[in-house]
Structure formats: C-alpha cells, structure tokens
Image (cartoon, helix red, strand yellow):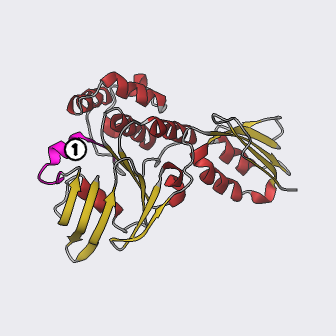
Amino acid sequence: MIELEGLGKSFRRARVLDALSLTIGHGERVALVGSNGAGKTTLIRCLLGEYRFEGRIAIDGRCPRSERTAVLAATGFVPQLPPPLKMPVGELIRFSAGVGRADPARIEALAERMGLDLAAVRRRPFVKLSGGQKQKLLIAVALGRKTDLLIMDEPAANLDPPARRVLFELLDEWEGGTMIVSSHRLDEVAALVTRVVELDGGRVVLDDRVEDAVDLSSVLRCRVDLTRPDAAFGRAIAAWSFRDADGDGLAWEGEVSGPDRLRFLGLLARYAGVIRALQLRENAAGGGEVARAQQA
C-alpha cells in the first residue's frame, strides 16, 4: 500500500505539490494524469526517494527517503527522459540485472520481444540509441525484475504501434502488485488502469474508478475503406503496419491492440472525409465481434 499524507514540494518560490494526500491499495493500476507542470513527475520522484519533501510517504510501511534502498529494490521504474548513460547496451543489461537480482537473459528476451535488435546495438553506448530503442530497453529492464511496484512515466513515448502492442501484452502478463502510469493524456493510458487520479497545481482534482477495464491482451482486426486513394492516409496507416488490401489504396487491413483503440480512432478522425466504411472485430478469448461502424 502507498500512503501520501500532506505531501508538499517547492522549487524556490514555485509550489509544485501542495498538501497532497492519497492512498493506493495493493494491486491497483492507477493512471496519474494532468497537464505538463501539474506535479506528476515531481510526485514520482518523491515516491522514488529522489527529493526531500514535506508530509509523509509510506510504501508498504517504508519511507522512500530513509529506506530508499529497500524501496527501490521492490520498484520497477521507466522514466520519462532516458538517462544519458554512456555504458554499452550489453554491459547495461548485465549491470541492471545484477543490481535488481534479475536474470539478464530475461531482460534480453523482453527487449527482443519489444522489437529491439540486440545483436545490432549490444556494443553501442546507451546514449547513442534512438529514442524508441532507449524506451524499449528501459521497459525491458523494469519488467525483467520481480517487483511489487511498477512506476512508468509516459511509458509509450517514442514507441511505434507494434511496440506499444507488445507493451500492453507485457503489462497484462506482469505479476507484480501495484502499477502507477503517468501521462499528460488520458487516452494514452486509460485502457491500462483501474483508477484515474488527476493532478492540477500539485493537488488531486479527480480520483475516479474505471469500471470496465479493457483486456490488455485483446487485438482488433480492422478494415478501413476509402472513398478515394489518399497518400497522406496511406503513410499514416502504414505506420500501424496496415497493408493495402487490394493494391489500389482504397482498402486497408491490419490489427490494432485493444488498449490502443482510442488512439487509433483519433488517427482515423483526422481522415473522416475520405473514410467510407470501418470494420473492427476483436480477437480475444471469446473471438466475437465487438464493433462495426460504416459511413456511407
């Protein structure tokens, strides 16, 4: 359990967290949302024991400042901004596994599953990787350890749709306890969580339950029919690994991870003027059709 009582933090004259109180139970999956500057990252840094703070924080009864080693040993963390590490990728994996008492082979397997070609980057300094490569490796390191708490700050940043789909699958398989996912966009994380906590001005302004969580392992089979070929749409949908079904640019088929459906529909909304029909079928355990929308 995580308990926050009267949490406060200031940087010079700026009040970033203001008498924030919150309780998160074991096993909850919480979305921490709010605009940039709302206090999300500062709250996470306090949970990790990086900042001094006013008030009280207890993670399973431990203070992250005075008992930081024990708290971090039970915590997996994916930062918003990758650290500027010059360590080669292979060495970083071995180091992270040693510190976290994890099997480096498991971290490597997760990185490969995320789509990171380790053979090509193993000797490359971490800092020289692309943004997406860094994110994939950091996710693999965090999930490769056995932890009770998983904290992710904008975890899907820099990930392509196929990697996002694998991330959702891995989170569905994660056997830890409590998960906190931070984002400035609710549609990015809504499907991952059972509770939404919104911050504004360093205070909790919304604390609500998600009654119908999306199955993280679900996959939507999709077909989009156009009124005419559109080059911009073709480039955008190809980034989701969709294929031109008939070779004429009028029908596109592919799959979308269930938790990514809102983001995918947001993409389609930008091209509503050329969409004639849309079909969505869910490939989950039940295998049934969940949605079909058509536009004349």
Whole-percent x, y for residue 188 in the image:
52, 54
Q: Which residues are magenta?
A: 62-78
Q: Which residue is mark 1?
A: 72
Please state which amino acid type lies under the numbered disc 1: Leu
Q: Is residue 213 left or right of residue 233?
A: left
Q: Is residue 211 left or right of residue 203?
A: right
Q: Which residue occupies the foreground of this view, 70 or 241? A: 70
Q: Is residue 148 left or right of residue 155?
A: left
What's the residue at 30%, 38% (across, down)?
147
Whole-percent x, y for residue 176 in the image:
36, 39
Task: Tell me if residue 108 comes above or below residue 21 in the rendering.
Answer: above
Q: Is residue 263 visible?
A: yes
What's the residue at 49%, 31% (across, down)?
115
Q: Is residue 77 visible?
A: no
Residue at far right of view: 296
Q: Which residue occupies the foreground of this view, 164 or 67? A: 67
